[in-house]
Image (spheres, rainbow, N blue to C red):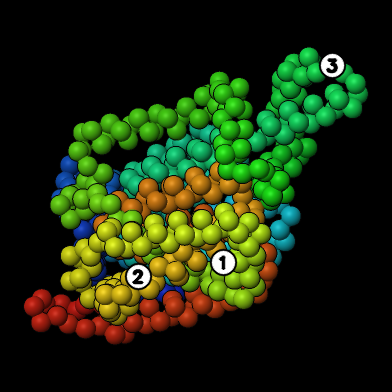
Amino acid sequence: MGRIAVAAIVSVWVIPISILVNRIVPDPYMDEIFHIPQAQQYCNGNFRSWDPMITTPPGLYYLSLVHVAALFPGNYFLQLASSFPEVCSTAALRSLNGVLAVLCSILVYEIITHLRPALDDRKATLFAAVLALYPLHWFFTFFYYTDVASLTAVLAMYLACLKKKYLFSALLGAMAVVIRQTNIIWMLFVTCSGVIDITLAHQRDSAKVYNLKANKGISPSTLITSVNVSSNLRKRKSRGNSEANKHSFYRTNTSSTSQTSGLLYEIQAIVFTAWRIKWELLVSFSPFFFVLLAFVGFLICNGSVVLGAKEAHTVSPHFAQIMYFSIVSALFAAPLHFTIGQALDLFWSFWKNRLLGFFLGFLALMASLLSVHFFSIAHPYLLADNRHYTFYLWRKIINFHWSMKYLLVPVYVYSWFSIFHLLDKTQRRIWVLVYFLATSAVLVPAPLIEFRYYTIPFYFYMLHTGINDCQSLLLMGILYTVLNVFTMRMFLFRPFHWDHEPGVQRFIW
């Protein structure tokens, strides 16, 4: 089936629903009232104009110029200044995310087949199609927001890094940061994943050479020279002969996680190996370092992470945010987490080492209780805007009673442990640690509860869970479809009005 099938499947719902949305809601809505006029200013060639309410960089608007130029090449190449801005309509700008959603699904297919080369093609196609239905990603496919472009750029960067095209990956990382500045964290995550990949490959080469020499009775004094020769030969192998090496990161993690003696051992082994091959790492990943330097320069010049509306988006220690992420992600992957088999599997993993399991459980509960008690933020936007579903979740569940946020703590802890348990089956623990730190670095500083912020970490989590049964994927697909039908129906056909403000209001994530 392959990437063409994935693109065709996603296009089946992107095209008709885009037409429906633009017919019923032809005018900009919510954040579009900032993004669309700003993009139209760029279409007019006014690149110095900037709306102070926009918080993200102009990467989406530059992509829009390329997209519109591709849609209407005649207007662009003939430089008809009077007609080119006219084609930057709301519908034309929204259609960019439709194209990117199709591209994003292809990237998911490419990544999953790269990480798991033994995966059946039909399952890979189903996996990519189901993730394309992920409600937070699916809904904003039809609107002019930065979310779809941000996810697409991050996944493209990750795929390029997996294929060891580090310069291209860094360029895609720069583009991701220009679309949304918090993607600098995901660029660092991808860099760390690449470093882990290379160091593990060198460890395997060293072990293979040592075993070979030991079997042949050759003196260990020649080991270092042999390792270097082996590394050089490995670099010269053809693509066909090195196909297994290309996917070794995922397969090695799958087979060797249980053989490690713990996280500290993994950190020590990777640090020692990284120091031994420091020049190779420096050459390979220096492009990412230059992107990081440019971002630091941006922070110094701008004085903040966000560009506009800085007062409403100040960095805050919102540790409860990672609790919300855990339960939302677990619910969106409910067939993987909330089953008797998963609960028993998780219980048995703690029971095998009861002392350590009790200590980690107690520590997680205490940290979660402290997070929701001292670092739970009710942003003014959350409390005032009843167009968002988070408004109702906050009022009807989290803030229903003073005790509710504490009663939910065991669910938060179970969700995180379940996520860790699934990742631990396929990934080394240092990779899981880096993933958790990256997710925390993105979510904790955000004072506003926005489920859109959870999309990228959810995708990385799903890509590395090792899910292999069609039943779970189909159940997730059904769950996503039901939610998507509900949210789109509410948005299109259940409008309402505010007494204090004219215009039609609609429900949105």
Q: Position of residue 67 (x, y in %)?
A: 38, 52
Distance from disc 1 to disc 3, alpha carbons, whole Å, reads 54 Å
Q: Position of residue 132 (x, y in %)?
A: 51, 65
Task: Name the element at disc 1.
Answer: helix
Judged by depth in the image, the label closer to the viewer, 3 or 2, is 2
Crowding at dot 2, Cα within 10 Å, few <14 / some 14-19 / many 20+, comes out as some
Nearer-the-camera pick, 160 or 373: 373
Distance from disc 2 to disc 1, alpha carbons, whole Å, reads 37 Å
Q: From the image, which quarter does the C terminus lie in?
A: bottom left
Q: Earlier in the sequence, mark 2 or mark 1?
A: 1
Left or right: where 98 falls relative to 300? right
Judged by depth in the image, the label closer to the viewer, 1 or 3, is 3
Q: In the image, is residue 264 above or below residue 373?
A: above
Left or right: where 389 falls relative to 273? left
Q: In the image, is residue 120 above or below residue 316?
A: below
Nearer-the-camera pick, 88 or 142: 142
Q: Which residue is mark 1?
A: 129
Crowding at dot 3, Cα within 10 Å, few <14 / some 14-19 / many 20+, comes out as few
Q: Position of residue 167 (x, y in %)?
A: 50, 32
Q: Which residue is mark 3?
A: 219
The type of residue carrying mark 1 is Ala
Crowding at dot 1, Cα within 10 Å, few <14 / some 14-19 / many 20+, comes out as many
Q: Residue at x 45, y 56 (%)?
A: 363
Q: Residue at x 46, y 36 (%)?
A: 170
Task: Name the element at disc 2.
Answer: helix
